[in-house]
Image (tube, coloured by chain):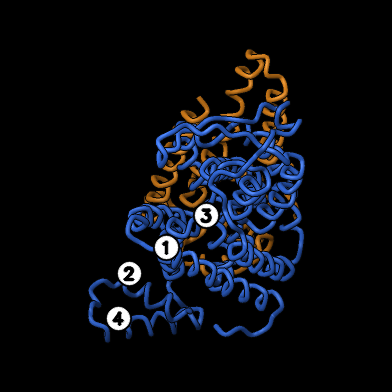
Chain colours: A blue, B orange
Amino acid sequence: MAATCALAAALLLHPGAVGAQEATLAAQGVADAAATGTAAWWFWPAVLFGMTFVMGILAAVGGVGGGVLFVPIVSGFCPFHLDFVRCTGLLVALCGALAAGPGFLRMNLASLRLAMPVALIASTCSVAGAMVGLALPTSAVQTSLGIVILGIAVLMVLARKSAFPAVRSADGLSQALRIHGVYMEASLDQEIAWKIHRTVPGLLLFIAIGFMAGMFGLGAGWANVPVLNLVMGVPLKVSVATSKFLLSITDTSAAWVYVNRGCVIPMMVVPSLVGIMMGSFIGVRILRVAKPGFVRWLVIALLLFSGGKAITKGLGLPFIV
Amino acid sequence: MYAKILAAGMYTGLCVLLATFALYLTGAVEPAIPIDRLPELWTLDVTKYLEAVNVQYLHHEHLLTGWTWVGAVGHGDYLNFVGIAVLSLVTLVCFLRIIPTLFRKHDYTYAVIAVLEVAILALAASGLLAVGE
């Protein structure tokens, strides 16, 4: 993995080394330096930029948030401490949510009435999760992170999505809160009215989702969408848009706990943000021609790999890379 | 209205962050921590990192947690915190802006939810919840 990172960094930073041999030699030098801890200061930020650029592409095409890939991969394969990785992961997910949120709100796809009660629960619990995550030993958090990431991969394999879930009647709480809406479904060229059910179990699940988002610095789109869509009966597009908007609230509260604790290193944050945004920009264009099914399996494989790495790193055991 | 504030805050925060990072990277504003010393610091946990930064470079009475970074924005690295703070405050501003509207519309349940959300975000942003020091 380090050698692959080094090759990417060498090609990125020495564009003149176009020949395979020169690139390999440059990569070998950088990899040796990285391995002995004498790498130039720019090496790992450059690797971070390259990794987040690829993550941005995979996240856009694979339909996941950047945060869920960022934390396990960067904490597993880069020398940055987990404290800084989690804070950067939250800021990366936050920026993605801030960028997408206004558009989804204007298109009437993200529902403020649905998001506000959910966000209150999730953000409160994300603050608690961040505090617990910072108080626990790093090895315990790293091992738990690995287990959660493996769980997310399994969830991605098993969860089926429903474009228009059947909701026979809205439950009492959602009626009292007037959580319902109408959106324009462009693929059918018609307006779709929606309402929700199972509001109480749905809201209770956001206690765990918010806690995990804060504790591990993960964006929570991987859990928001299945709960909104499959448990509460929100149409898929509204679930995805509301989930993205929700992250702008949940991740903000957790991010503040990390920022106030001093977990910000700008040399990590800015290359990551720029990398993932540029990757997402390219990813959206690739999405038009790519086979999302293949990329989804690639994302699942990456999650399994990085989850395994996180567990072994947390337990101090050897891993294949 | 919420969407408009969210978009404006996001663009402002991002522009500030990129501009301050350019000042930091080019050395136009001298950083507190020399850039070439970062690799030996980012491997430490946050408590050891803050202690090392304080002992070696900042020499403050207390570690730089909470909002104390404001006193260090004269340094290129801490100047970047301004953009991060703007991005992290956008949601709080959005909620503050919709509260009067919700009360005006007699939507008291959602007005209370918005007030509670502001309280949570303000508490998180205040620095009162910093742990592990």
In the image, what residue type sits under mark 1? Phe
Mark 2 = which residue? A12
Direction from residue B26 to residue A37 in the image, left or right: right
**Which residue type does callout 4 highlight?**
Ala
User: Label 3 to label 2, Cα distance in Å?
Assistant: 25 Å
Question: Which residue is pictured at 64% across the width and 61% down the height?
Answer: A83
Q: Badge 1 is on which residue?
A: A49
Can marks 3 and 4 be said to lie on one chain?
yes
Whether residue A71 is visible to the viewer of this picture, yes or no, is yes
Of helix, strand and loop, which one carries label 2?
Answer: helix
State which tag comes first along the sequence, 4 or 1: 4
- Subunit bearing disc 1: A
First in sequence, mark 2 or 4: give its number.
2
What's the residue type where badge 3 is placed? Answer: Gly
Residue B103, horizontal then vertical, whole percent: 66, 16
Q: Could you tell me which secondary element the residue under label 4 belongs to? A: helix
Picture quarter with the C terminus of chain A: bottom right
Q: Which residue is mark 4?
A: A23
Q: Can you tell which quarter of the image residue A57 is in?
A: bottom left
Neighbor class of circle 4 (other Cα within 10 Å; few <14, some 14-19, many 20+) is many
Residue A238 vs A220, above or below: the answer is above
Crowd tier of the residue under label 1, counting other residues whose Cα lies within 10 Å: few below 14, some 14–19, many 20 or above: many
Mark 2 or mark 1: name the one nearer the start of the chain: 2
Q: Earlier in the sequence, mark 1 or mark 3?
A: 1
Asked if disc 2 and disc 1 are in contact, CB closer than 8 Å, the reply is: yes
